[in-house]
Amino acid sequence: MLILECPYCGVKAEESELHAGGEAHLTRFGPGSSDAEFHDYLFMRENPRGVHFERWRHINGCGKWFHAARCTTTLEVFGTYSAQTLEPPQAIRDAVSAKRPGWRWRDL
């Protein structure tokens, strides 16, 4: 079972209390974008084996969106952080690097 801590209210919640929102740190395209940009946004997503950054919403709590870093093969959670953050905090990047030697944030 996946347990994530909401960075806003501090509650540790099971995944059934949260809603997954897909890949984090994407440029979101909508009206006014080209067909190619919108196509890529909808269909060309990463589905990595290993470290993945995702958006989650605390639906049975504060209702806010946040990001989580986790491993898709082991479900190990490296940390959660505010959705307004443009890239993961250094502490989370260091935690991932410690467990996954050779991993770098910009490799995504």
Image (spheres, rainbow, N blue to C red):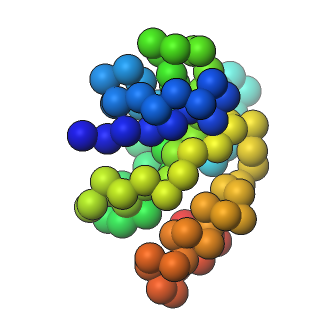
Q: Residue at x 68, y 22 (%)?
A: 31
| Along the line of sight, the residue nearer the viewer: 59 or 37 | 59
| 19 over 48 or under it: above or below | above
* Vertical position of residue 46 compared to residue 95: above or below: above
- 10 lies above or below 79: above
Residue 44 shows up from this direction: no
Residue at point 62%, 72% (across, down): 94
Left of 49 or right of it: where is 69? right
Residue 46: x %, y % from top left: 43, 55
| 94 relative position to 54: left or right | right
Q: Position of residue 91 (x, y in %)?
A: 67, 64
Residue 1 appearing in the image? yes
Q: Does residue 40 appear to the left or right of 8 in the view shown?
A: left
Q: Nearer the viewer, residue 11 or 86?
A: 11
**Quadrant for the N terminus in the image:** top left
Residue 63 placement (x, y as % from top left)? 57, 15
Q: Residue at x 75, y 45 (%)?
A: 85
Which residue does the image show at 46% across and 32% down from the upper left?
12
Which residue is most to the bottom? 102
Residue 19: name its quadrant.
top left
77 horizontally vs 34: left or right: left
Look at the image and tell me in which quarter the C terminus lies.
Answer: bottom right
Query: In the rendered image of this protein, does residue 23 appear above or below residue 99?
Result: above
Q: Nearer the viewer, residue 19 or 5?
A: 5
Count of numbered labels shown in the rendering: 0
Q: Position of residue 107 (x, y in %)?
A: 57, 74
